[in-house]
Image (cartoon, grey):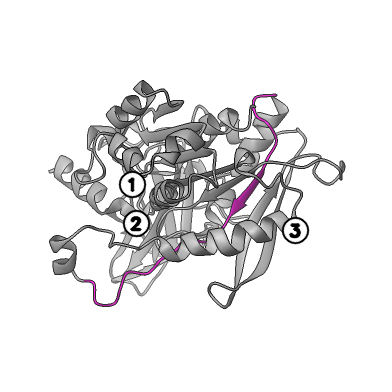
Amino acid sequence: MKQQIKLLVLAVAFAGNIPLGFGQQSNKVIEDFKPSSVNQSGKEYPQVNSEGRVRVQISAPEANKVQLDIGAVKYDLVKDENGVWTGESSPQDVGFHYYQLNIDGASVPDPGSLYFYGASRWGSGIEIPAKDDEFYALKNVPHGEVRENIYYSKTNDAIRRCFIYTPPGYQENLEKRYPVLYLQHGGGENETGWSSQGHANLIMDNLIAEGKSEPFIIVMDNGSWHRPRKASTADRSQGTWPPQGWADDFMNTLLKDIIPMVDSKFRTIPDADHRAMAGLSMGGMQTRIVTLAHPEVFSYVGMFSGGSISPEDVEESPAFKDEVKTLFISYGSSELENRRSGFGGDPKANTQALANTGMDTHFYVSPNTAHEWQSWRRSLHEFAPLLFKN
């Protein structure tokens, strides 16, 4: 039954907004819980123990049933004589997870946690400590800046927002110009995801301080799309999903508005040799579509849990092989163990096949993680040192 549940969650996790934490149930809970690192200031709950269990607590004296909803599983909480409900989950995978509370059927954020945008809403998040969290830890090293950038999009006739990371030294050496990575979030998330949940800025600060990565600018924009109103389950079963042209709006915005705006406002090196695109889940799928359609714009391509590029794709876009210097594909190990059908074939085999044609390809597997932020943090950490070396 647990395997069936896990396969079901993987099947609907196109968006990149469903954390997959399947731990082993145990009757014995280790009582070494500590407040989460992403709690609101002064809040004791939620808490995490050494097993990776999440414990929550909320005062709801009039409620009849309260549950913790995390990892696509609901856990019943227990009410004490004061109307305070407490309970915990089974162990979760390391890294960041979205969660919510369910009070008498209403799903609400936990008032103890900071809020993050995922699952198409602002809600609660929690961090399960990882043994390899040093690469995104806040350290005493030179730090870059993440700035909110508001701009007008002629393509959409709308005011839009993106977040832009500039590396350490950007403000000091005003003569230096930088390459750019356009880095996309998953479905149900937005332009805040990579700097908030993903810690992209800290990952880069640490890599640059260690001399492992070239400094570059990162642009994090909103690639959200909305399914057609007429789309139904029947529509999905009768054809390809997502539908033809689903990424066109963002592709046009990126090429006609975002890239020209960034090149005009920031000290970039405005050519394909110094431009990369990557994304997680839905963002990886967008990256695939955009870079195959316009290989003359990007020289480096990264897809994290977002399908892969096959030899057949390259045959239909022959310039891709000539223009793209590096192709990076990654997944969490649990994703490969329960690989979704109809998602572009075997990603490892596709990547190796392209390597056999002479392309510089890389296939990375995040150990013991699934379709979740720890896989994507690790992926960026592996991808960034490959960029702009020449």
Q: Answer whether labels 2 and 1 touch (C-beta < 8 Å).
A: yes
Q: Which residue is mark 1?
A: 89
Q: Which mark is residue 68?
A: 2
Q: Is residue 347 visible?
A: yes
Among the 4 quarters of the image, the one containing residue 103: bottom left
Q: Give percent across and percent down for residue 7.
A: 19, 44
Tell which circle, 1 or 3, labels the residue nearer the N-terminal end.
1
Label 2, label 1: how many angstroms apart (C-alpha)?
7 Å
Mark 2 is on which residue type?
Leu
Tell which circle, 2 or 3, labels the residue nearer the N-terminal end.
2
Mark 3 is on which residue type?
Lys
The answer to whether residue 147 is left or right of residue 160 is right
Magenta residues, as a range? Answer: 211-231
Q: Is residue 129 visible?
A: no
> Is 230 included in the stretch rendered in magenta?
yes
Q: What residue lies at 67% left-to-right and 61% top-to-bottom?
A: 261
Q: Which mark is residue 265?
A: 3
| Circle 3 SS class | helix
Query: 204 and 80: which one is in front?
Result: 204
| Circle 1 SS class | loop
Query: 382 and 1: which one is in front?
Result: 382
Q: Indicate the quadrant containing the N terminus: top left, top right, bottom left or bottom right.
A: top left
The answer to whether residue 234 is left or right of residue 9 is left
